[in-house]
Image (spheres, coloured by chain):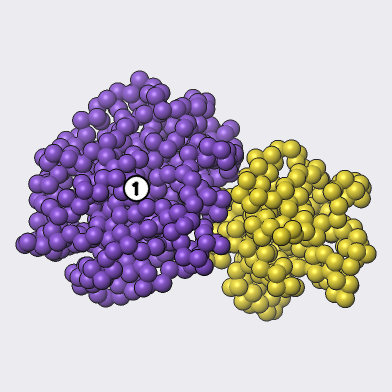
């Protein structure tokens, strides 16, 4: 059984690799795209050995938007599925006083992923098939004092995905928004995360695989997050602004 | 972060890091007092260091597989579960496996785990071609059997360095099924005679009713196993020989703990198990999972003993005195009425390795919920083992005293000398090694 290739943007991240394993396990060849892609050779070998699929590495910089059309032309083709897991949490307290750092967070979480997915969407639309997966964040559902630079960029990305889905719904292209809550990754290393709300990267990968198979639109990795965010979003702004969150 | 062993009796606040590269790991090694932690399946405090526990979850890639020889090279954090998931469909199975597949390769080497084929094939270390070991200076050395450092690393619970990579020989199999033969043994002598008479079986293990008394003392069901060939399978299973169906209870009456734990006493359980075993004598085909890993099907089975947890007791006894020592142990246990759901008796074969647990003879393993009388009972059992010249399994130990350990381990002095000479004592250590004075 040959399945279409999956392009992972952000192939070095824990969630990216976990998603690669989940989809390679379903028989999809994998193209891992990241900066310094050659350094991912051990991951390439591991994926290929475990799942018996073709895995290739591709140089990709999410901030280099000018190079993106060229990047797509270097790929073996147009993938069946693209998954963007690119993200940068930044350091909110520091970035508030450092516009350059804040802009990097905004560009990495919104401008870059939206631009590359937009380019791929155009090509998938022309082909009339494909799936686009954007891993955004529950942080984008309401701005909070402790992470609103990251959160606002994710909000933009979530809205972009929503619009893309609206546009492509009748064009044979499936757009999936993934809103993980806390995930135990390098990004959150050292944080004291509540166990019940925290997913392992493998859970995110499995959720992406299921959501692709089920043609879902928006998924939370841990269902409890849907409830948590419903509550957080329902708090009136006048009250919300006084909370420490 | 609060860590404890699988028995849940050794909770301790530990500083835990998860390095992602050799450079990051070397920086941790330089801090000293480090212990590597794999899947946390050792029962006690062997993988805990208050100051410097390293979670090996950052090293879990497979590196190479040679399908001519069956040699797998993988990072130490890869689990046997992953090895089986990847390679059983291609016709390969771990050549030695313990009773759970949720252990890491690094942990399996560190504990030098054994399986039901120890009497024929030895321990896990015997299936390893080489390991990459990070020493106290942060340098990585490839060490193979024959190298003293290899001998001292296998079975010493991580006290010679951090195992980074393992080259492991898998065994070729035609199917994922086991031909299991169940033989009843009405008492201990019969169980031992059954082991001796079936020394050529690939796998052998006995469930032993540790509460049976009098003439039934040590009554057992001896389970023998052989990898099934393709021709052994019924026609309809041959198309998917590596994917046994989810086991039905009719086929495998022994995966019982799931329902047993709801209120039946241990004694009743043992009675039921014995009768179910008698009803199921003879040969049958069993899938690899229920055969090798009956408890893995019960997620979190270590919680059945409640919040206080439980302790495992596992000893090895020299062949010449095993019968008497086992009888003495079983008398103590049955008199105390404190046995476990699944007590296990097994014949060990000869054993290489400078500090490995097995020895030619017998091993008895059982667990006890932790309550008032347990400590005194365990102390009595310890004395019987020490008197017999036996020893204890560090992967199971959570409470042994230094005095008992010294008495049971004439090898400890030489190991301490090696640790000092190689500059390992300050670099690597665990709560267990402190307790035991290693």
- Give the residue displayed 39% in from the left and 36% down from the top: B126
Rendering quarter of residue A79: bottom right
- Residue marked by disc 1: B202
**Residue A63 position within the rendered picture, expressed as x and y whole percent measured from the top left:** 83, 48
Rendering quarter of residue A153: bottom right
Query: Which chain identifier belongs to the yellow chain?
Result: A
Q: Answer yes or no: is residue B338 visible.
A: yes
A229 is higher (above) or lower (below) than A22: below
Rendering quarter of residue A82: bottom right
Name the foreground residue: A133 vs B244.
B244
Q: Is residue B428 left or right of residue B261?
A: right
Q: Colour of chain B?
A: purple
**Residue B263 position within the rendered picture, expressed as x and y whole percent measured from the top left:** 27, 76
Residue at the extreme left: B214
- Give the residue displayed 20% in from the left and 52% down from the top: B194
- Give the residue displayed 89% in from the left and 72% down from the top: A171
Q: Is residue A12 left or right of residue A198?
A: right
Q: Secondary structure at mark 1?
A: loop
How many labels, in total?
Answer: 1
Name the foreground residue: A239 vs B197.
B197
Q: Chain of mark 1?
A: B
**Residue B328 position within the rendered picture, expressed as x and y whole percent measured from the top left:** 9, 51
Q: Is residue B116 left or right of residue A79?
A: left
Q: Dot 1 surroundings within 10 Å: few (below 14), some, or many (20 or more)?
A: some
């Amino acid at each position: 059984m040959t399945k279409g290739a999956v392009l992972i943007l952000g192939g070095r991240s824990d969630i990216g690799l976990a998603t690669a394993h989940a989809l390679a396990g379903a028989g999809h060849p994998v193209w891992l795209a990241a900066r310094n892609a050659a350094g991912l050779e051990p991951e390439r070998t591991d994926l290929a050995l475990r799942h018996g699929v073709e895995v290739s590495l591709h140089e990709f910089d999410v901030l280099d938007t000018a190079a993106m059309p060229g990047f797509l032309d270097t790929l073996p083709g147009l993938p069946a599925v693209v998954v963007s897991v690119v993200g940068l949490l930044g350091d909110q307290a520091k970035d508030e006083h450092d516009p350059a750092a804040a802009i990097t967070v905004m560009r990495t979480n919104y401008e870059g992923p939206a631009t590359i997915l937009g380019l791929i969407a155009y090509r998938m639309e022309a082909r009339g098939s494909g799936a686009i997966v954007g891993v955004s964040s529950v942080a984008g559902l309401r701005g909070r004092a402790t992470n609103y630079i990251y959160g606002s960029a994710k909000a933009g990305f979530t809205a972009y995905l929503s619009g893309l889905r609206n546009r492509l719904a009748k064009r044979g292209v499936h757009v999936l928004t993934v809103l993980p809550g806390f995930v135990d990754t390098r990004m959150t290393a050292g944080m004291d995360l509540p166990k019940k709300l925290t997913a392992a990267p493998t859970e995110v990968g499995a959720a992406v695989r299921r959501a692709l198979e089920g043609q879902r639109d928006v998924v939370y990795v841990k269902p409890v997050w849907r409830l948590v965010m419903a509550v957080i979003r329902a708090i009136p702004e006048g009250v919300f602004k006084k909370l420490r969150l | 972060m609060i860590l404890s062993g699988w028995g849940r009796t050794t909770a301790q606040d530990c500083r835990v890091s998860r390095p992602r590269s050799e450079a990051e790991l070397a920086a941790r090694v330089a801090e000293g007092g480090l212990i590597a932690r794999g899947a946390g399946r050792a029962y006690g405090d062997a993988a805990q260091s208050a100051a410097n526990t390293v979670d090996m979850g950052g090293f879990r890639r497979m590196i190479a597989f040679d399908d001519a020889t069956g040699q797998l090279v993988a990072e130490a954090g890869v689990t046997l579960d992953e090895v089986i998931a990847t390679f059983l469909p291609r016709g390969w199975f771990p050549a030695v496996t313990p009773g759970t597949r949720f252990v890491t390769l690094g942990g399996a080497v560190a504990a030098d785990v054994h399986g039901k084929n120890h009497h024929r094939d030895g321990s896990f270390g015997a299936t390893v071609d080489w390991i990459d070991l990070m020493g106290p200076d942060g340098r990585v050395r490839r060490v193979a059997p024959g190298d003293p450092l290899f001998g001292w690393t296998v079975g010493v619970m991580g006290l010679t360095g951090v195992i980074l990579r393992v080259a492991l020989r898998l065994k070729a199999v035609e199917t994922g099924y086991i031909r299991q033969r169940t033989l009843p043994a009405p008492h201990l002598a019969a169980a031992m005679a059954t082991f001796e008479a079936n020394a050529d079986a690939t796998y052998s293990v006995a469930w032993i009713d540790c509460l049976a008394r009098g003439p039934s003392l040590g009554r057992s069901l001896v389970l023998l196993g052989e990898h099934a060939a393709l021709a052994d399978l019924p026609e309809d299973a041959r198309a998917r020989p590596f994917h046994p169906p989810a086991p039905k209870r009719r086929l495998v009456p022994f995966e019982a703990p799931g329902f047993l734990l709801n209120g039946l006493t241990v004694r009743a359980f043992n009675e039921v198990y014995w009768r179910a075993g008698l009803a199921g004598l003879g040969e049958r085909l069993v899938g690899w999972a229920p055969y090798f890993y009956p408890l893995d099907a019960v997620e979190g089975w270590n919680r059945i003993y409640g919040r206080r947890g439980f302790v495992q007791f596992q000893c090895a006894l020299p062949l010449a005195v095993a019968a008497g020592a086992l009888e003495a142990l079983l008398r103590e246990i049955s008199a105390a009425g404190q046995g476990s759901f699944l007590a296990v008796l097994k014949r060990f074969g000869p054993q290489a390795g400078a500090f490995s647990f097995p020895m030619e003879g017998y091993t008895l393993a059982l667990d006890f919920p932790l309550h008032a009388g347990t400590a005194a009972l365990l102390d009595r059992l310890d004395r019987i083992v020490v008197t017999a010249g036996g020893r204890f399994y560090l992967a199971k130990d959570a409470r042994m005293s230094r005095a008992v350990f010294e008495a049971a381990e004439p090898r400890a002095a030489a190991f301490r000398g090696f640790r000092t000479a190689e500059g390992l004592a300050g670099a690597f250590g665990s709560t267990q090694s402190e307790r035991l004075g290693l």
